[in-house]
Image (cartoon, grey):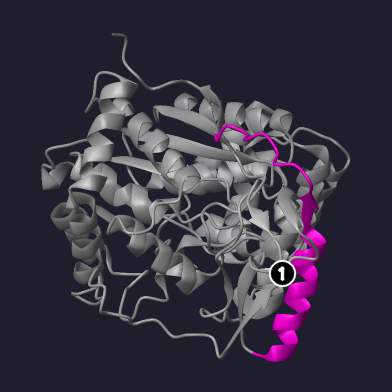
């Protein structure tokens, strides 16, 4: 089957057959489709969309493009669960959530991705931990899940390889914001991971791929429908991304914030609320709690008593990282040579944030990729980022900028000042959870 004929058919608004979709996925996997042809196909889907049947066919074919993990031989005493976020700015939730769920009796084999567009990637964050292996051999991955209860890694060579190639090309061809492609990308990895339950964190707002609540709901409905149709019990939360999540943006900086959170030293209220809501959904979906309220209580306890932190430390150690990662005196992370305050243009309150511009500013600092082959500077980014409603002025900058050079820091100052609006009155707070689909809680 000629690649250009499959592309032409979708470009012109046709519905692809299962055989045509399978041919495209084979071309992705064996490289018989060129990068240009894959980009053209992705752009055609971006503009023409896909039916639900096409989405299911694409997801299934991408899942079967490699191996599918099995966990039954380990005889784990709990359900195999996972969470996936559609991406945001400052989203380091996975680093906190996976060990919390593990401490509550779940097992979390989390297959994560790298930065996509203006959003950060969990693997890029974990790469800043010296020695941590984001691409371990299968036996080590299974050992980490068994011993720590969680392991956050990237796609192996055999796990949904079609998605790995498509994911990288979408990142640099402005085809990220496609609901069919997002659905297939997420679920092919999750289905290949052998899960028994999945909770989606679908973000919406100025820093999300789904800029509107309507688009976020459409994406959540697509993922929940395709996943459950493929036999994977799935629910979704729609969460707000109209400001940075937490107080940091940038790979090493976000890991530091996550460690402080796990130690109970620096707990951002909005970030904590997202983590706890997702944890409660996962525990209910896995049958570990009878109600959302009970599940949240268990998750809060796991965070407060240090058992979640211990799970994270064990995961890092098993996967080759430092054995003292949680020690306050341990500081294995490199630091940016330039740290510059971003002054507020005037006194007032943060009234609005174009969060995408904040993410782009960090990419421009070197904290993300402009091309597939780009390397990332793990040290750059933002700390002490002001939240919506925070007072700013001469004594309170918008953020601290961590940069490789003074010049790049000054460009980031201009970008942040352009992205953040300051008003005279404190705005009303927006709830962090905006909707639920396919709620996982059992009837009480």
Q: Is residue 426 visible?
A: yes
Decide which of 439, 234 is in the foreground and name it: 439
User: Residue at position x 31%, y 15% from top?
Assistant: 442
Image position of 10 (left or right of 306): right
Q: Is residue 67 visible?
A: no
- Check disc 1: other Cα within 10 Å, few if <14, some if 14-19, many if 20+: many
User: What range is drawn magenta here?
Assistant: 405-432
- The percent coordinates of residue 288 (x first, y second) are 22, 28
Decide which of 257, 442 is in the foreground and name it: 257
Quarter-of-image position of residue 336: bottom right
Quarter-of-image position of residue 95: bottom left
- The percent coordinates of residue 16 (x first, y second) are 72, 36
- Count the labels in the image: 1
Decide which of 432, 202 is in the foreground and name it: 432
Secondary structure at badge 1 equals helix
- The percent coordinates of residue 172 (x first, y second) are 72, 66
Q: Quadrant of the C terminus?
A: top left
Image position of 368 (left or right of 96): right
Image position of 251 (left or right of 70): right
Image position of 430 (left or right of 6): left
Q: Which residue is mark 1?
A: 361
User: Residue at position x 71%, y 63% from top?
Assistant: 393
Quarter-of-image position of residue 111: bottom left
Q: Residue furthest top?
A: 444
- The percent coordinates of residue 396 (x first, y second) are 63, 65
Reply above or below: 1 against 118: above
Residue 423 is inside the magenta segment: yes
Residue 248 is inside the magenta segment: no
Q: Residue furthest right?
A: 12
Decide which of 165, 250 is in the foreground and name it: 250
């Amino acid at each position: 089957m000629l690649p250009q004929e499959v592309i032409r058919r979708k470009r012109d608004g046709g519905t692809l057959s299962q055989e045509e979709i399978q041919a495209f996925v084979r071309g992705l996997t064996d490289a018989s489709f060129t990068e240009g042809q894959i980009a053209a196909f992705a752009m055609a889907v971006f503009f023409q969309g896909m039916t639900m049947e096409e989405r299911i066919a694409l997801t299934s074919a991408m899942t079967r493009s490699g191996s599918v993990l099995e966990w039954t031989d380990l005889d784990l005493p709990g359900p195999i669960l996972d969470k996936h976020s559609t991406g945001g700015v400052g989203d380091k939730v996975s680093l906190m959530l996976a060990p919390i769920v593990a401490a509550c009796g779940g097992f979390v084999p989390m297959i994560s991705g790298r930065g996509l567009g203006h959003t950060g990637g969990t693997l890029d964050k974990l790469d800043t931990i010296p020695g941590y292996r984001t691409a371990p051999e299968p036996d080590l991955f299974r050992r980490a899940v068994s011993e720590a209860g969680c392991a956050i890694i990237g796609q192996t060579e055999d796990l949904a390889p079609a998605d790995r190639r498509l994911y990288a090309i979408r990142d640099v061809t402005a085809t990220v914001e496609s609901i069919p492609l997002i659905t297939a990308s997420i679920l092919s990895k999750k289905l290949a991971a052998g899960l028994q339950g999945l909770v989606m964190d679908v973000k919406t707002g100025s820093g999300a791929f789904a800029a509107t609540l309507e688009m976020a709901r459409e994406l959540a409905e697509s993922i929940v429908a395709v996943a459950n149709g493929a036999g994977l019990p799935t629910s979704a939360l729609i969460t707000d991304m109209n400001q940075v999540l937490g107080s940091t943006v940038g790979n090493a900086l976000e890991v530091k914030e996550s460690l402080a959170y796990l130690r109970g030293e620096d707990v951002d209220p909005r970030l904590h609320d997202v983590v706890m809501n997702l944890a409660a959904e996962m525990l209910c979906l896995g049958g570990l709690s009878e109600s959302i309220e009970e599940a949240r209580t268990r998750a809060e306890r796991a965070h407060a008593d240090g058992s979640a932190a211990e799970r994270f430390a064990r995961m890092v150690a098993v996967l080759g990282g430092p054995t003292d990662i949680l020690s306050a005196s341990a500081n294995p992370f490199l630091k940016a040579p330039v740290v510059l305050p971003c002054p507020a243009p005037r006194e007032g309150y943060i009234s609005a944030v174009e969060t995408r511009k904040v993410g782009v500013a960090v990419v421009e600092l070197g904290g993300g990729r402009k091309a597939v082959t780009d390397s990332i500077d793990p040290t750059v980014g933002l700390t002490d980022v002001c939240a919506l409603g925070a007072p700013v002025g001469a004594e309170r900058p918008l953020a601290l900028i961590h940069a490789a050079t003074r010049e790049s820091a000054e460009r980031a100052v201009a970008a942040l000042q352009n992205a953040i609006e300051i008003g005279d009155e404190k705005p009303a707070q927006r709830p962090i959870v905006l909707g639920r689909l396919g709620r996982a809680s059992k009837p009480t």
